[in-house]
Amino acid sequence: MSDPILAVENVSKRFAGRVALDSVSIEVAPGSITGMIGPNGSGKSTLFNIVAGTLRPDQGRVLVTGQNTGSSSAAEICGLGVARTFQISRLFAEMTVLENLVAVARGRDDRAAISLALELLDFLEIGDIADRWGAELSYGQRKLVEIARALMLQPKIMLLDEPFAGVNPRLQNRIVEHLRALCARGITVFFIDHEMRIVLGECDLVYVLAEGRLIARGDPQSVRNDAKVLQAYF
Amino acid sequence: MKGINPLAIIGVAAIVAIVLPFVGSDYAISFSIQLLIFLVLAASWNWIGGYAGYTHFGQVGFFGIGAYVGSLLNFHYGMPWYLAAIIAALAGAAVAIPLGGAMLRLKGPFFAIGMFGLARVLEAFALGFDSITGGGTGIYLKPVSDLRPLYWAVAGVAMIMVLLTWRLDNSRLGLKLLAIREDESAAESLGLPTTRLKIGTFVASAIAPAAMGSIYAVYLGFIDPPTAFAPNMELTTIAMVLLGGMGTVLGPLVGAIVLSVVNEVLWASYPQIYLACVGVIVLLAVLFMPRGIVSLGMKKGWFRIGRPQFRRLAARKEQAAA
């Protein structure tokens, strides 16, 4: 494996004495689609929040493109090329879709930001909702707009927190196609989801968390047949 | 796009403001100075409270600092009021920089009440350091014989504030502040330098109120702690923004005009109960127009919807593609 774009090394986190993550280590290869599964409360979103810098680990460290992010703010980690979406949509409801994207754009040129935003909306086939308010969107549209907003940051790696949850199968397939297209553009995708059809069908590598511990790691086939995974998940 | 363009309303207001000193009575000019001071305070508060979502009750602290800095320079050194106002504005910014760094760690009600507490501390200082500030006796300034120069200064600052708000509303900076208002931690996760943006906005929102404090002291010819740091001034400013529409270009303008006129009419007609009447009007407005007159107007199509710049640019791009 080439140098990982993201490495989580022995990360532990407790909330009021309860173990959320227990010495978890993962690596994500550049240009890959990596998935993470695990029962509810297994620590998946906590791990994403630590990688994105909204939570600090009690122990361990996170490296993005080899750089330790221990003392970096969420905005600085974002500046290293990490963009994320949220489990529960956090679009800016009182802005239009276009404004949601333009608000987070880098650089000083408004026209370039608008141009990139429209291009991304077209890429995700949601250009027709550019002028709609964030609050008006359907659940599936919100998921797509969040992906577009993350892409505005021109990231190296995207962390997608349950992008397929509550989305109809047709839209799920569209999102998968878009993720594949992103990988073809050289963007690494690391996502959490419960949608086994997609996780086991599309990922190059799958991690499985249960009760804050990493219980399996491997290609989809080996994870599907892992006894510990079957016991924890099914 | 339907509805009246905010710039058209700003233009009409500017024409009225320019014509008024030539046709208005001394009373009209005096009333307009007060209205315009409130407009400047409301527009400044709207930046941090309306756009960035950091509502607070401490802006009168900067107004008071400006009032004292300007008055002391005028009283002790005979500095012209307009120079004293500029230095007062700089003093407001100088105080706001460290204060913003410390206070903006707080959020929501803690920030709002913390700022109120700070204004009260400043008032106590002004009362306590009577060798410098004159304490409860206050400072008496040489009265101005003609209010028109004060009027032009205040009207100029008000126009700049309204135009800056229009610029902010149509800029990515404005969108970034709205993002902080809506979801600060998501905004930070998406790479926005939230701390820098908040402190910058807080400092910017302190400059004009400090200048207005200095000019208000000259207008009254007198300043003392209860006048410089009056909670009533703060509450009226916030009521104007709430009534007009928080986080909008026209909100402070509409709120300042409506509430100042209502205040004046009721005060003239029902001096005993006018404050209660104003309170009821604000209460009814907040109950039935919780987003303010301008937001209601946007919803009804009377005013063109806010932040048109990005939509216009998007439309142009689509036209070019077609």
Image (cartoon, grey):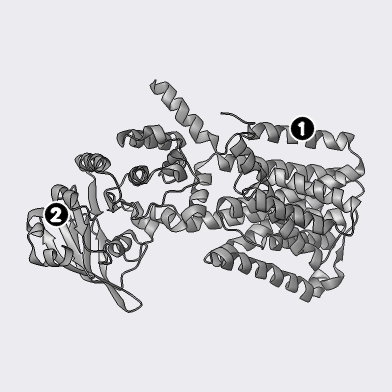
Q: Position of residue A145 (x, y in %)?
A: 37, 43
From this view, report whether residue B225 is shown above or below residue A190.
below
Q: Amino acid at mark 2?
A: Leu
B132 horizontally vs B291: left or right: right
Count up the numbered dots: 2
Q: Position of residue B161 (x, y in %)?
A: 67, 44
Q: Position of residue A161 (x, y in %)?
A: 30, 54
User: Closer to the observer: label 2 or label 1?
Assistant: 2
A53 horizontally vs B84: left or right: left
Q: Residue at x 53, y 34 (%)?
A: B309
Q: Are marks 2 and 1 in contact (CB under 8 Å)?
A: no
Q: Quadrant of the C terminus of chain B?
A: top left
Q: Amino acid at mark 1?
A: Ile
Spatial CA span between label 2 and label 1: 67 Å
Question: Which residue is label 2 attached to?
Answer: A205
Task: Say if labels 2 and 1 share a chain.
Answer: no
Q: Residues within 10 Å of mark 1 (few under 14, many from 20)?
A: few
Specify whether residue A83 is in view.
Answer: yes
- SS class, disc 1: helix
Question: Which residue is label 1 attached to?
Answer: B15
